[in-house]
Amino acid sequence: AVPLVVAISTAVSANNGLLIRNRTAFENSRKITTVIFDKTGTLTQGSHEIASVVLFDMAMDEREMLRLAAAIEQNSEHFIAQSILRRAKEQSITVPPSQAFTYLPGKGLEGMVEGKDVKVVGPNYISEFNINVPSSQAEEGVETVVYVLVENQPVGYIAMRDQIREESAEAIRVLKQNGIKNLLLTGDNERVAKSVSDQLQMDGFLANVLPHQKQEKVKELQAKGEFVAMTGDGVNDAPALAQADVGIAVGSGTDVAAETADVILVNSNPQDIASLILFGKATYRKMI
Ligand code: ADP
Ligand code: MG
């Protein structure tokens, strides 16, 4: 049966934007009972258009804050980083180098720019260290917010708005119709997570999930007897992708995610996950 399965999985991948990296992954795909979606880049486009740039500090102007933030973000592959760097480029800002760079998993980045400590971090970092920031309008909505700190003083924030992919609602609908549960897992804030989950009528969501907690959540579901597929795009997602029964990397993601995954979604289209499961079921039904 091996060559047949290989042939079939190759055909499936060619037609459906799937790159199946091993035979077991294809065999396992039909057993999936729960699909965990990482929000950014799979269910959403990852566009992170900048909605507003707000300054707290009178001594800071928008260009200067973007310049410092971009210096830090050039070390990251996250959509947040791409968006900030794009804005800096549009405004013809010369981005200086940064040194002694530290990655704060699921929280942001820190580094030295021109001798000053600069951080670009999410609301979770702000609350963890009890940093006082003026209350933000953006958090009330469905925006992803990152704060810029210079020498530990918050100088402002950048709010970004992502967009749900057109194909996502149909992908969730088809999964549900076939009795497969779905769950949104994201490092982003509660409001953004709830908004995406509600709009797509998902079974549930978990927000503010740190990278190592993604892997724990997969384990937890497996312990309850679920056969879990997990999607992800980031370096951070690799442990969860490895833990999952079927790890699915998004085509636009990092190499680390792709190397860890069993399946790669070439077009980053969530509908292809449903196709993978249904093709797996149909194939093995025929063979038995
Ligand atoms: P997700 O993929 O679900 O959006 P991540 O774990 O990639 O979650 O990111 C979670 C949060 O960590 C982001 O919403 C942001 O607050 C923070 N973060 C991650 N990467 C960066 C970055 N490059 N710059 C600033 N903040 C970041
Ligand atoms: Mg991510």
Image (cartoon, helix red, strand yellow):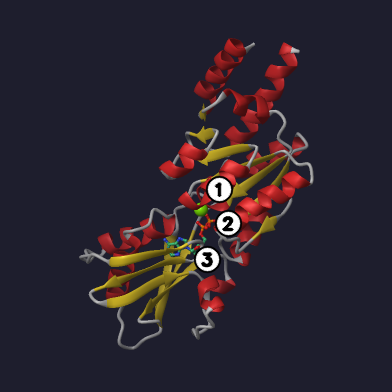
* Residue 31: % across, % down: 72, 31
Residue for badge 3: 143
Q: Quick one: 181 or 55, which is closer to the camera?
A: 181
Residue 177: x and y, percent?
A: 76, 36
Q: CA distance from mark 2 to mark 3?
A: 24 Å
Residue in the picture at 78% in, 37% down: 179
Residue at 68% over, 18% down: 283
Q: Are marks 1 and 3 in contact (CB under 8 Å)?
A: no
Say the numbered circle drawn on residue 212: 2
Tell whether circle 3 marks a residue whose Cβ is less than 8 angstroms from ligand 1.
no
> So how many labels did they put on this image?
3
Disc 2 marks a residue whose amino acid type is: His
Tag 2 near tag 3, CB within 8 Å: no
- Circle 1 or circle 3, nearest the eye: 1
Q: Label 3: how many residues lie within 10 Å, few (<14), some (14-19) or many (20+)?
A: many
Q: Is residue 20 above or below residue 258?
A: above
SS for tag 2? helix
Lower sequence index among marks 1 and 3: 3
Q: Quadrant of residue 274?
A: top right
Give the position of the N terminus as an image quadrant. Answer: top right
Mark 3 element type: loop
The residue carrying mark 1 is 239
The furthest residue to the bottom: 58
**Kind of residue at badge 3:** Glu
Q: Given this view, does label 2 or label 3 mark the residue nearer the observer?
A: 2
Few, some or many C-alpha atoms within 10 Å of disc 2 (few <14, some 14-19, many ≥20)? some
Residue 68 falls left or right of residue 255: left
